[in-house]
Image: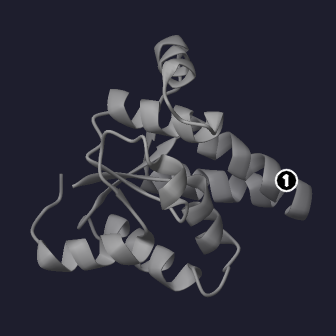
Amino acid sequence: MKVIFDTNVVLDVLLDREPFATSAALLFSKVERGELFGCLCATTITTIHYLVYKALGIRQARKHVGSLLSLFEIAPVNRAVLEGALKSDFEDFEDAVIHEASIHAGVQALVTRDVNGFRPATIPVYSPDELMSALELSPHEKQ
């Protein structure tokens, strides 16, 4: 199964934000083991770099971004993605961009802690715990 990770789930892992970090880290582990095909929106990468740079400096920002790039496919953001997001029913533009990039990248599901923010989504949306449960029911799916 190809899944895009919302920025908040990535931050849960990188910042070890409990009680959310455990489920998010387990999903990252599934990506590392090839049990789940992970994807990030290009805007997630830029947001992560900015936040880590501000908190920990340029070296740590580049280290974390490099790790994410080695683990996840990146869903591009281009004019078509931005225009689709602008025309969507999403209230939050950032969520709309992530969703639209997901559609263009052929993603099958989205994982976020803000499930309500993705109500207009046309693909299944899971919390990290919900996705873990769904994957336990279908352990052989990879893409």
Residue pictured at 54% horizontal, 51% vertical? 117
Residue 57 image position (x, y, % from top left):
89, 57
The quadrant of the picture occupied by the N terminus is bottom left
Task: Say which element carries label 1.
Answer: helix
In this view, the residue in front, 96 or 57, is 96
In this view, the residue in front, 93 or 18, is 93
In this view, the residue in front, 121 or 62, is 121
Up-down: is 141 above or below 90? below
Residue pictured at 48% horizontal, 59% vertical? 115
Quarter holding residue 32? bottom left
Q: Which residue is mark 1?
A: 53
Up-down: is 128 above or below 115? below
Quarter holding residue 31? bottom left
Is residue 123 visible in the rendered image? The answer is yes
Instruction: Name the side, left or right, on which 139 lies relative to 22.
Output: left
**Alpha-carbon neighbours of circle 1 within 10 Å: few (<14), some, or many (≥20)?**
some
Instruction: Name the side, left or right, on which 15 lies relative to 97.
Output: right
Residue 48 image position (x, y, % from top left):
70, 52
